[in-house]
């Protein structure tokens, strides 16, 4: 049994492919390798080259394995369905070309939900018909991933409609584990107000991939008390280095070991480029912290 630790472009501030603040894609690969990692995610489709030969050569140059990729798209918006399908198909092709398996499905930030991140009692809710269409869109994209030989995985995320514990449980109950697995993100659990370790214990038989993230308890408490929206909370530094946050990573590690988990766990330290972050330094610090508690 082996647990491997990777990283992702969002740790370099890359959330959208054409953001002018993004670092150059080769810089992300180079610094990921310099920080001691052997695996990296694709990032948003269009950030890294979609030409398999070009990206493959760079992965080989920096001795990195492509782990997987995310479809961070507005599943909540039926009018954006063609956009969602296009991004998903391109992501499938890119992952399959490099032997990556993790096909992570995330409902992106909704203007109806971003203002109430971290506050489930205030969050807008879908009606029955809207919810049924929403679930079906996840089901269709999961089937697409299966056709490419990938592992479709649901990833809850603050600021979208797949965020709080009750709605995650509801969707998992409606789409079978044979079609949709689970990528748990520890920091999005704590942001949403539920314990990632307790949640993982209930669903370890469905968890095939893990994102390591943590939240700064004081920043989160202030954001909730002040009714701060998702983007402003990110700008205030709600996501922090793993050793400085409220996620109990030794307990996460022990749970993974007890369950016989084998595979990748990927650090996703979402950072705001406006905060002048140090992605390379943070990547090193996070890797060193995980090694200090027993991850290798």
Image: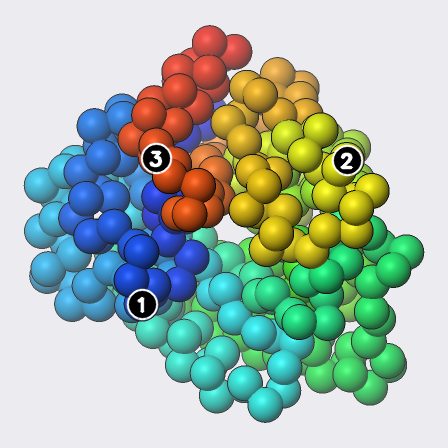
What residue is shown with label 2? 221
Report the residue at 57% width, 66% height from top: 108
Q: What is the spatial separation of the Cα atoms under label 3 and label 2, in whole angstroms?
A: 25 Å
Q: Earlier in the sequence, mark 1 or mark 2?
A: 1
N-terminal label among 1 and 3: 1
Work out whether residue 7 can be spotted: no
Position of residue 274 in the picture relative to residue 185 (left or right): left
The residue shown at (56%, 38%) is 237
**Which quadrant holds residue 87?**
bottom left
Q: Is residue 174 left or right of residue 104?
A: right
Q: CA distance from mark 1 to mark 2?
A: 32 Å
Residue 279 marker: 3
Return the residue at label 1: 18
Question: For the point 90% across and 56% down, which residue is it?
Answer: 121
Q: Going by the picture, which residue comes out furthest to the right?
A: 121
Say if mark 1 contacts mark 3, CB within 8 Å: no
Q: Are marks 3 and 2 in contact (CB under 8 Å)?
A: no
């Amino acid at each position: 049994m082996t647990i491997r630790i990777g990283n992702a472009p969002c740790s370099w501030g890359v959330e959208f492919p054409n953001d002018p603040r993004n670092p150059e894609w080769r810089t992300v690969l180079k610094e990921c390798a310099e920080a001691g990692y052997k695996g990296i995610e694709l990032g948003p489709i269009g950030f890294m080259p979609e030409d398999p030969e070009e990206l493959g050569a760079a992965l080989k140059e920096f001795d990195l394995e492509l782990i997987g990729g995310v479809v961070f798209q507005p599943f909540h918006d039926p009018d954006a369905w063609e956009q969602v399908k296009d991004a998903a198909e391109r992501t499938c092709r890119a992952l399959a070309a490099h032997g990556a398996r993790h096909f992570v499905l995330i409902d992106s930030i909704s203007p109806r939900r971003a203002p109430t991140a971290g506050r489930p009692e205030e969050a807008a809710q879908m009606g029955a018909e809207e919810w049924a269409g929403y679930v079906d869109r996840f089901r269709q994209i999961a089937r697409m991933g299966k056709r490419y030989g990938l592992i479709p995985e649901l990833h809850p995320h603050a600021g979208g409609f797949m965020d709080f514990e009750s709605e995650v449980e509801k969707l998992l109950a409606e789409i079978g584990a044979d079609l949709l697995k689970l990528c748990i993100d520890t920091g999005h659990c704590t942001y949403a107000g539920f314990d990632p370790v307790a949640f993982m214990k209930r669903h370890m038989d469905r968890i095939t991939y893990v994102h390591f993230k943590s939240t700064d308890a004081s920043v989160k408490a202030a954001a909730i008390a002040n009714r701060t929206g998702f983007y402003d909370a990110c700008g205030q530094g709600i996501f922090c280095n793993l050793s400085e946050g409220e996620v109990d990573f030794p307990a996460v590690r022990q749970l993974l070991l007890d369950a016989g988990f084998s595979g990748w766990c990927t650090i996703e330290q979402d950072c705001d480029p406006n905060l002048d972050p140090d992605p390379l330094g943070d990547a090193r610090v996070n890797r060193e912290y995980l090694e200090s508690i027993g991850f290798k």
